[in-house]
Image: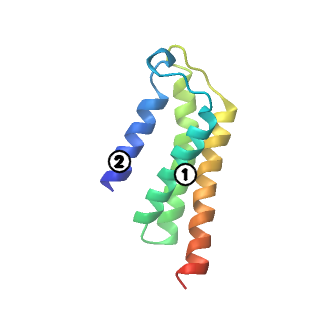
Amino acid sequence: MVLLGVVASAVCAGCLVPNRWLPPLPNDKFLHFASFAVLAMLALRIAESHVKALFWLLGLLVAGWLIECLQSLVPDRRFCWRDIGANTAGTVFAAAAAQLYVTFFRA
């Protein structure tokens, strides 16, 4: 749970600071995808049931939207639909990978 909090804090900090504070990021969509995939994997590890797992995943999807909305309030940042797509894709990828793992390796 602590690791999830640390990673979530790092993702929020990276997404909600002005661009001029960040190094050049040639492929930020991959960073969005990877960070939300990691968050989803960590959340799924601590979920104790399918209902809690769905709760965590829906929370991450909402967080991805919320972060993008908040970015429009930060200097040098803007709302980007492709970032939301990358956040969502990372979350869905992690959920699918976790389901495949449970189906084929934890039977």
Please report the residue visible at 46 percent of the width from the left and 27 percent of the height from the top: 16
Which residue in the protein does label 2 denote?
Answer: 5
The quadrant of the rendering that contains the C terminus is bottom right
Circle 1 Cα neighbour tier, 10 Å, few/some/many (<14 / 14–19 / ≥20): many
Could you tell me which secondary element the residue under label 2 belongs to? helix
| Callout 1 amino acid | Ala
Tag 2 and tag 1, C-beta contact below 8 Å: no
Q: Say whether residue 84 is left or right of residue 21.
A: right
For label 2, the crowd category at 10 Å Cα-Cα, with few meaning under 14, some 14 to 19 and many 20 or more, is: few
At 41% from the left and 43% from the top, the residue drawn is 8
Residue 86 is left or right of residue 45, and the answer is right
Tell me the quarter of the picture where residue 54 sits.
Answer: bottom right
- Identify the disc placed on residue 37: 1
Q: Is residue 6 above or below residue 42?
A: above
Specify the color scheme: rainbow
Q: Is residue 40 left or right of residue 13?
A: right
Choose between 23 and 71: the one closer to the eye: 23
Farthest left residue?
Answer: 2
In this view, 96 is above or below 82:
below
* Residue 27: quadrant of the picture: top right
- Secondary structure beneath dot 1 equals helix
Residue 94 picture location, percent across and down: 58, 58
Q: Label 2 amino acid?
A: Gly
The spot of residue 10 in percent (x, y) is 40, 37
Q: Is residue 19 above or below residue 42?
A: above
Quadrant showing the N terminus = bottom left
Pinpoint residue 105: horizontal percent, then vertical percent.
Answer: 55, 80
The image's mark for residue 69 is none
